[in-house]
Amino acid sequence: MPIENNFQHDELSRKNPGERLSVADLADVAPPDSPAWAEAMSECGVKLSQAGVASVVFLHGSLHGTDVFGMQRLDEAGGLKRGYSRGVSGVDALLAAMREGDNGIPLLPGGLKPPLQDDDATKALLDEQIGDAGNFTGAYVQSFKRGINQNLAQPISCIRLLWSSEHHHLGRAVVALSLLAELHKLCQQQNLGKEHRILIQAHGQAGLILALLSNLLCPSPITGRPKLLGILTDYANQTNQTKLTGTLKLVESLLATASPLNGVALDLVTFGTPVRYGWDPSGIGKLLHIVNHRNLRTDGKGWLAKLELPQITMEMPIAWGGDYVQELAVAGSDAVSPIESAKAANKRVWEMVEPYDGFERWLECARRAVRFPSEGRCLLVDYKDSTGSTNPRDHYYGHAVYTRRHAQLFNMSQIVRTFYEL
């Protein structure tokens, strides 16, 4: 997308990404906590430090208890119970397999639903219920912290943030504001300035929050920024959300300055993020998108996913082609808030950031089979997570592997190689 993207949706280009694209396999790496693993992670830490990285932030939501594929919005827009097929063979079976309650992804204990709280109790619950499947566990973050800081005189801080997991435009927009406020606080606490960088790793739809953040941080006075802040201010006032009101006031004051984060550069990595919102590269540092992908195409366009009906209903349960959540949770899909005021605010945000709605538009976007946005470096990785198992908890349709402990060193090595090796 262009500089001053102004919250436009990504163009969903099917063109070869060219030099932006790299391909890798999850090769045999040293087992976590082994001497070889410790040495390699330490080397990564040294390179992070040399590049000025002062903090690493891990941003994630929950796979359990959420409408991961966004079927609620599709159902509301088109009526799955009435039949979606419209003459498209196999699509009803695919959508039924995606639907919450039928896709094999369990609920959280006690019926816990978004918005999830970013507190120790909720994080501990996720660690217990999900482990390291699409979840940056406490153990994962602590292991990462120990690994990269072994030989550093000035340790790099490592922070885990759990976003609300509200898979709709309003939920993501609110968290984008909260994230900016958190980053501002982090910069103040660590006395960070223009010689420093913050590396953010975001799993799944958390990457969409970073896309919105990139638009917020555009240094030019874009028209979409006050419009979005106005929508959220109206929503906060109508629902008496004093915390959100306070965050909005802080963010407005930050964005009124020439350097909201005191000159600190944000280096952003997304894992398995669906291609939806456009990115604005002008106010951020480096940008990398990593996607679990196995090429099933025969037309030479290996950078695209494969969506052929009805074959996909046989491929998806074993994650044969890679990350199917990244492929299918595209424009037109979403969770639906049960609160009327939130629905109204969400509609206002949606009209601003995503000109796609309804079943036909969703199918059109899914069939684009685009793995990457139009901005940033791209890395296709075969994570070797398709073992033939049809149990979603083994792979979560290819969406879980990015945060597995055994992939930690591989991911970090790829990030360092892409961002920080001179």
Image: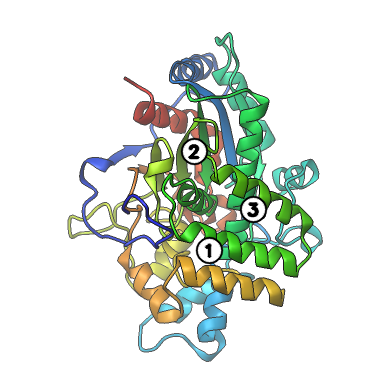
Q: Are marks 3 and 2 in contact (CB under 8 Å)?
A: no
Q: Residues within 10 Å of mark 1 (few under 14, many from 20)?
A: some
Q: CA distance from mark 1 to mark 2?
A: 19 Å
Along the polypeptide, which appears first: circle 1 or circle 2?
1
* Residue drawn at x 36%, y 60% as measured from the top left: 10
Q: CA distance from mark 1 to mark 3?
A: 29 Å
Q: Quadrant of the N terminus?
A: bottom left
Q: CA distance from mark 3 to mark 2?
A: 35 Å
Q: Are marks 1 and 2 in contact (CB under 8 Å)?
A: no
* Residue drawn at x 55%, y 80% as measured from the top left: 75
Q: Label 2's element? A: loop
Nearer the observer: mark 3 or 2; the answer is 2
Coordinates of residue 240 in the picture (x, y in percent): 79, 64
Coordinates of residue 252 in the picture (x, y in percent): 60, 49
Coordinates of residue 246 in the picture (x, y in percent): 73, 51
The answer to whether residue 101 is left or right of residue 25 is right
Residue reaching furthest left?
A: 300
Whether residue 15 appears in this view of the structure is yes
Residue reaching furthest bottom?
A: 82
The answer to whether residue 200 is left or right of residue 299 is right
Along the polypeptide, which appears first: circle 1 or circle 3?
3
Amino acid carrying label 3: it is: Ser
Amino acid carrying label 2: it is: Ala
Q: Nearer the viewer, residue 411 or 167?
A: 167
Query: Residue 227: which numbered mark, if any?
Result: 1
Query: Residue 258: which numbered mark, if any?
Result: 2
User: In the displayed structure, would residue 36 be above or below residue 129?
Assistant: above
Q: Label 3's element? A: loop
Check disc 3 and report the residue beneath it. 62
* Residue drawn at x 58%, y 16% as measured from the top left: 149
Q: Nearer the viewer, residue 187 or 371?
A: 187
The answer to whether residue 268 is left or right of residue 392 is left
